[in-house]
Image (cartoon, grey):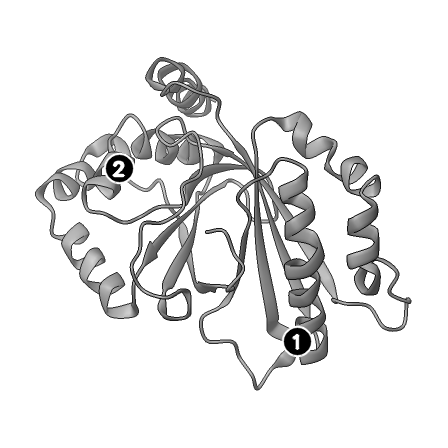
Amino acid sequence: MKHFILGLLLVFGAAAAHALPGPRYYYQLRVYRCTTLTQVQRLEAFMEKAFVPALHRAGISQVGVFVPLQPDTADTARALLYVLIPFRTIDAWLTLDRVLAADKVFARDGNDYLEAPYNNPPYFRMESILMRAFPDMPAPAAPGLQAPKSERVYELRSYESATEAFHANKVHMFNEGGEVPLFKRLDFNAVFYADVLSGAQMPNLMYMTTFNSKSDRDQHWNAFNNDPEWKKLVARPEYQHNVSKAVITFLRPEPFSDF
């Protein structure tokens, strides 16, 4: 219990004093699982023609839509589509369905998806992950990359921890510990860093960094791992054993993605 309370104090006490100005965004990451290529194509068309434009009309100016960098074509059941939706407030997330239901243009342009029959659905299942932005990056950012979207590599990472206390410790390491500023100094072009509030792999945090290419990504991580500041930070006794599993997913943005 002592370690649990200390871990929570690290995040909710110190983070409050360390927070940057401005509201901390909430993020919903939707992960759609498809069983056929036709489903993937219907989803992509829905996102481009109906869903993303409707979110723009609702005041959400940046929406990310991504697919795996190297989809497993031998196993179509693993076909995935990722959608990142930033919300300025939790109320904006709670009221999104109502806002979309009142959008007649959305109903018209998204009809194939919205009115799909039970025996011909546009996806198999959809997972929803709700997150809150870290204090040291309270809002999302579009990456400042030069390469065309078709050549970019986006890296989505999920860091799972053994307990809530170790998770809180890792969140503290990113913020008060200086990990977020280190990523920024080394030009990792992060889209977001966030604490998972509701999801299947809790306790965990998630973040997304972006690169012009796979070789660009490898060069950045080589610089990170050899940076004296990182070596000093990762060796600090108070930050040991705070990640029990790291899940890395390589993505590329769809042509119509805002990120």
What amino acid is at disc 1? Ala
Q: Vertically, is 2 above or below 206?
A: above
User: Label 1 vs label 2: CA separation?
Assistant: 36 Å
Viewer-side residue, 212 vs 239 = 212
Q: Measured from the top left, where is residue 88 in percent x and y?
A: 56, 29
Image mark for residue 179:
2
Viewer-side residue, 73 vs 108 = 108
Viewer-side residue, 158 vs 59 = 59
Q: Quadrant of residue 81?
A: bottom right
Residue, far left: 228
Q: Measured from the top left, where is residue 67 in percent x and y?
A: 53, 66
Badge 1 is on which residue?
77
Q: Residues within 10 Å of mark 1 (few under 14, many from 20)?
A: some
What amino acid is at disc 2? Glu
Name the element at disc 1. helix
Q: Quadrant of residue 116?
A: bottom right
Horizontal relation, residue 232 to residue 213: left or right: left
> Which residue is drawn at the image coordinates 78% and 58% (left, top)?
110
Q: Residues within 10 Å of mark 2 (few under 14, many from 20)?
A: many
Horizontal relation, residue 232 to residue 108: left or right: left
Horizontal relation, residue 97 to residue 20: left or right: right
Image mark for residue 180:
none
Q: Vertically, is 220 above or below 201?
A: below
Asked if marks 1 and 2 touch (Cβ < 8 Å), the reply is no
> Which residue is drawn at the image coordinates 18% and 37% (left, top)?
233
Q: Quadrant of residue 111?
A: bottom right
